[in-house]
Image (cartoon, helix red, strand yellow):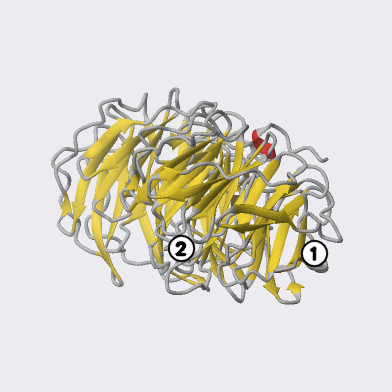
């Protein structure tokens, strides 16, 4: 038998959720070994994987094993290795909602299997230590008070859970003989254990499933025949069905019946990693032909879509999930992999009938830095940095101070210092840099210090040294247009950063001297009349401005304590300054950024920990998040959240010059591995971009 690592990593079950008036699959979720531990995608019956849903704001804390949806698609539950051992979330067309409160009595240890009852009135969890199975009432409010344990417990680690289709029985696959234990189930919880089957499974059971009509129960297990199926009735186990004539090739982990009961599939060790058979009242039929493109490694979880049109397998190596059309003829041609893969070993997989289509994107991250080639770009995914793109054929002419992708990802611009033209822009595609756009006919007048595109991508602005300190240009697929007229009231000194409000109605410039930040209305005609300065000014040189995603706040990183200042923002301009955070950044603020959902504000700065993040709400700064466990190695400069809010990256003064971390409602995750090819020197600007796949 091939090894899957730890005892946790040998445990998996794929479960498929279905429900609602329609059986059309609209979403698919995969549990896996590394951050964010669960990944969900929209699903299309013709094309397969769509775009990735945003991660839940509160992630499972560790390796997740099984995933299941309620039958009505209103909730999703994930079993995982560490406390609270099971996490459940509201689910809707938009994806993950708020995490439900943990059950008041937790499972006793690492949870491996989870399942909802067919009427969504209960949820059960299989886990590593006694009592091996724990069940709770379930409602729209989440977990109820734990049901009493069964009077006769399973004999070992509960590895998989299944309710019978009518909800009258609950089965647990486990690690010690008799390897499967089944109880009557009712609104009162567990009944008296059914008698064991007369012919037991031959080894540790990892998966269990009832047929859709409730007339059979199947167990995936270790040792030949690797799958065992029995007749099932209100009296319990009937006779074991004959083994399939062609057995799975190694230990069975997941088992699933098709929704119409005409097929059964087993995920297993050893190629072909999944085996499927016709199923009838007579049991197993002759094995279907293997898919023409196999999963890449050991099959852990398996699920049919609710309408039976697709089958998916979670497995141990990239792409970690593989899906195929399914019909009476068996496997169809493999669907394309999701554009943003799960990040590690796939353990469980489930479909839902609830979910809006999500656009699939290819993501990128670019870093502006102080030595040649002055800009470096990488693919970005949930796994972190990909292989560096080739340098542009025509490099920026000096120190890269800022970098920005256009909103549609079709262009990449770099502000640069020490040498004209101070702004350089390139077409951008999945292949990387294109041929440099022609310089604007009227150049910025001094060192470029920051660059921003308007939200609709029709304008590009540069903050720079020397009057007029900010220059803005129309932008199109042809590059720079004719420079907009300067604002009638110029910034007071060197521009260090520039940002547009999310609705494109305002532009803000931070400057070296008082008032440190100046803002103007913006329209198709360019700069409007300058807004009044804030009544309480930032206390030092402004370095970078940022607007909150809803445009209700503007924040400025600056050189003197409190190092970051935030103000309400409206069509009237600056409001009264928010109170300072209770724990200030450690030194000079270099950049500031809001998370895409507006729930956090991060500041990069001089002095350890080099990056500081705070919860943010309508009341202003909340509590400081814990510092990342692995800090950036030097003074923090440019910083950005990924566009889906699942990561944060900061450029800094010492190798590796850029550090990136997962981000969630809990704050910083464990640092991503450094890019294989590092930026060559201090990274001053960081930007994420994406292109629709």
Residue 672 screen position, x and y as percent: 59, 37
Quadrant showing the N terminus:
top right
Image quarter hosting the C terminus: bottom right
Left or right of 183: which side holds 665? Answer: left
Q: Nearer the viewer, residue 381 or 446?
A: 381
- Could you tell me residue 122's position as x and y percent? 41, 49
Q: Residue furthest front?
A: 235
Q: Nearer the viewer, residue 250 or 663?
A: 250
Q: Is residue 204 above or below residue 415?
A: above
Q: Left of 606 or right of it: where is 394?
A: right
* Mark in front: 1 vs 2: 1
Q: How far across and how far down the image is residue 644, in percent?
A: 46, 53
- Label 2 SS: loop
Please tell me how crowded label 2 is: few (under 14), some (14-19), or many (20+) other residues with Cα within 10 Å: some
What residue would you read off at disc 2?
A: 407
Between 307 and 243, the one nearer to me in the picture: 243
User: Residue 439: which disc?
Assistant: none
- Label total for image: 2
SS category of the residue bearing label 1: loop
Quarter location, residue 345: top right
Residue drawn at point x = 44 percent, y = 27 percent: 627
Q: What residue appears at the point 27 percent right and 55 percent down from the top-left corner?
A: 551
Of 143 and 325, which appears nearest the observer?
143
Q: Residue at x 30, y 31 (%)?
A: 623
Query: Which residue in the protein does label 1 denote?
Result: 293
């Amino acid at each position: 038998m091939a090894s899957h690592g730890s005892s946790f990593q040998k445990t998996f079950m794929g479960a498929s959720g279905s429900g609602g008036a329609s059986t059309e699959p609209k979403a698919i979720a995969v549990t896996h070994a590394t951050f964010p531990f669960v990944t969900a995608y929209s699903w299309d019956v013709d094309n397969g994987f769509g775009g990735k849903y945003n991660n839940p704001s509160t992630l499972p804390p560790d390796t997740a094993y099984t995933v299941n949806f309620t039958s009505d698609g209103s909730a999703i539950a994930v079993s995982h290795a560490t406390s609270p051992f099971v996490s459940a979330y509201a689910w809707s067309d938009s994806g993950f909602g708020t995490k439900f409160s943990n059950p008041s009595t937790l499972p006793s240890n690492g949870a491996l299997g989870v399942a909802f009852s067919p009427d969504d009135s209960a949820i059960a969890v299989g886990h590593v230590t006694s009592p091996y199975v724990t069940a709770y009432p379930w409602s729209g409010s989440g977990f109820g008070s734990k049901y009493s344990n069964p009077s006769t417990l399973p004999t070992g680690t509960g590895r998989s859970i299944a309710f019978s289709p009518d909800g009258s029985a609950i089965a647990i696959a486990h690690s010690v003989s008799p390897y499967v234990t089944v109880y009557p189930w009712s609104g009162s919880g567990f009944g008296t254990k059914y008698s064991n089957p007369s012919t037991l499974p031959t080894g540790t059971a990892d998966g269990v499933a009832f047929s859709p009509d409730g007339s059979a129960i199947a167990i995936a297990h270790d040792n030949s025949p690797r799958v065992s199926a029995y007749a099932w009735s209100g009296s319990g186990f009937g006779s074991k069905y004959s083994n399939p004539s062609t057995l799975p090739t190694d230990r069975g982990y997941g088992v699933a019946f098709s929704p119409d009961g005409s097929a059964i599939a087993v995920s297993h060790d050893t190629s072909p990693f999944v085996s499927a058979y016709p199923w009838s009242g007579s049991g197993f039929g002759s094995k279907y032909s293997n898919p023409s493109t196999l999963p890449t490694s050991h099959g852990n979880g398996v699920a049919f879509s609710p309408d039976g049109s697709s089958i998916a397998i979670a497995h141990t190596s990239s792409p970690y999930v593989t899906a195929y059309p399914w019909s009476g003829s068996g496997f169809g041609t493999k669907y394309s992999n999701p554009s943003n893969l799960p990040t590690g070993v796939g353990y469980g997989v489930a479909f839902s009938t609830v979910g809006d289509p999500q656009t699939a994107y290819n993501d990128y991250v670019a870093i502006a830095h102080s030595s040649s080639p002055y800009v470096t770009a990488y693919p970005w995914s949930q796994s972190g940095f990909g292989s560096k793109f080739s340098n542009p054929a025509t490099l920026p002419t000096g120190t890269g101070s800022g970098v920005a992708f256009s909103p549609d990802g079709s262009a990449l611009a770099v502000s640069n210092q020490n040498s004209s033209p101070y702004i350089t822009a390139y077409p951008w595609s999945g292949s990387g840099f294109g041929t440099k756009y022609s310089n604007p006919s009227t150049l910025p007048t001094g060192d470029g210090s920051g660059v921003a595109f308007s939200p609709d991508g029709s304008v590009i602005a540069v903050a720079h040294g020397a009057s007029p300190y900010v220059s803005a240009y129309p932008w199109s697929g042809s590059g720079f247009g004719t420079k907009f007229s300067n604002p009638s009231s110029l910034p007071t000194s060197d521009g260090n950063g520039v940002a547009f409000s999310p609705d494109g109605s305002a532009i803000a410039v931070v400057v070296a001297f008082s008032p440190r930040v100046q803002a103007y209305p913006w329209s198709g005609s360019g700069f409007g009349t300058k807004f009044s300065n804030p009544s309480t000014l930032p206390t030092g040189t402004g370095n970078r401005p940022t607007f909150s995603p809803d445009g209700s706040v503007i924040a400025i990183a600056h050189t003197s304590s409190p190092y970051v200042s935030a103000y309400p923002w409206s069509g009237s301009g600056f409001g009264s300054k928010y109170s300072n955070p209770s724990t200030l950044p450690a030194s000079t603020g270099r950049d500031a950024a809001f998370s895409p959902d507006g729930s956090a504000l991060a500041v990069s700065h001089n002095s350890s920990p080099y990056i500081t993040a705070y919860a943010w709400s309508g009341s202003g700064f909340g509590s400081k998040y814990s510092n990342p466990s692995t800090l950036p190695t030097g003074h923090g400069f440019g910083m950005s959240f990924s566009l889906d809010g699942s990561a944060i990256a900061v450029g800094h003064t010492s190798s590796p010059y850029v550090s990136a971390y997962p981000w969630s409602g809990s704050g910083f995750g464990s640092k991503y591995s450094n890019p294989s090819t590092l930026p060559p020197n201090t990274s001053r600007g960081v930007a994420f971009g994406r292109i629709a796949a």
